Structure formats: structure tokens, C-alpha cells
Image (spheres, rainbow, N blue to C red):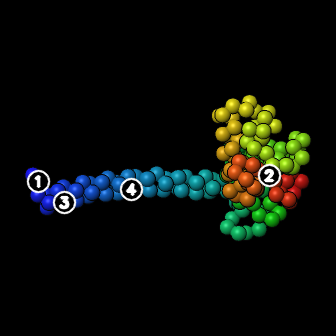
Amino acid sequence: MPSVMGLLEERERAARQRVEALQAELREAEAVWERFVIARETVGEVLTESRGGEEVPRAVVDGERPEPVAAAVPGSVVPHWQEGLAPTVLAPDYRRIMDVLAGGKGADGEAMDCRRLAAALGLEPVAAKVEGVRSKAKRLAARGWLAEDRPGMFSVPAGRGAGS
């Protein structure tokens, strides 16, 4: 029968190996993250240079009043909603969700679940499409563009619709 000290040493050795493996994984993840930070900064510099030194427009930066921005493109980041920020800063898929919920497609501004929302957007109400709409609606709600009064029921708060 193994001794108590032997068992403790064995467990300590296993824990140390796990910590070392996790530290190596953390170093690798930090290196990947650092490459993305550098890539984003480099792209920002290149875009600034290509505009002749004019600063690249941004939607919202930590509590600042939003600046006028160009229309968003597919794949754009969804900015946090702030007073005066219009839905035109959103990528087209997100704007369509806002339009439908604001009543632009006959929804009368009422709260909708994602299955009805997907159908109103002209998508087949199959699980994959509905989950894509749910993901976008949840992202809009998390950033203040939509309200989720009850789980899965989304609506546009007053002042945040297509006409804002």
C-alpha cells in the first residue's frame, strides 16, 4: 500500500504539470492576442495614411459623443448605443433587424420572438437561421439597441428606431 506522503507527492507532481501546461497555453494565447492587437493597430495606421492623414471615423469611444461615421459594412462591430447614435452605424443585417422591430416591415413596433423575426426578415424559420437572428438580436440587446423584455422577446426602445 502506498504511503500518504507518496500519494501527496504524486498529486503535487500532477498539479505542477497541469500548471505548467496551462502557463504554456496562456503564453500561446497571449501571443495570438498580441498579434491581433498589432494587426488592428497596423490596419488603422494604413487606413489613416490612405486617407491622407485624416483620422479613420469611429462610432463610439468610451463615453465620447459619437462622431459622424460612414455607413457600416457587413462584419462591422456593433457599437454600444448612445444618445444621438443612429442605426446607420450598424451593419446591414443588424439594421434590418432594427427596421423590422421598429415597424418597418409591418410589425407595428411590437416585441417579437426570433422565429417570427427570422420570417419577417425573409429567412426560412429553420433552427440555423433562427439561431443566427437570435445571436444578432442578443448582441443588439447587450449593446443597448434593443430591449429584451422577456427572454427571447425583442423590441426597439423609444428613440432607437430607424428614424432616430
Q: Give the secondary structure at mark 4.
A: helix
Q: Residue at x 38, y 52 (%)?
A: 25
Task: Give the numbered dot on residue 27.
Answer: 4
Is residue 148 at least partly visible in the picture? yes
Question: Amino acid under label 3?
Answer: Leu
Q: Tell which circle, 2 or 3, labels the residue nearer the N-terminal end.
A: 3
Q: CA distance from mark 1 to mark 3?
A: 10 Å
Residue bearing the label numbered 3: 8
Q: CA distance from mark 2 to mark 3?
A: 57 Å
Residue 152 horizontal side relative to residue 86, left or right:
left
Q: Residue at x 78, y 35 (%)?
A: 119
Q: With respect to residue 121, does 45 lie above or below?
A: below
Which is closer to the viewer, label 4 or label 1? 1
Dividing the picture into quadrants, the one containing residue 113 is top right
Q: Tell which circle, 4 or 3, labels the residue nearer the N-terminal end.
A: 3
Tally of marks: 4
Residue bearing the label numbered 2: 155
Q: Residue at x 87, y 57 (%)?
A: 164
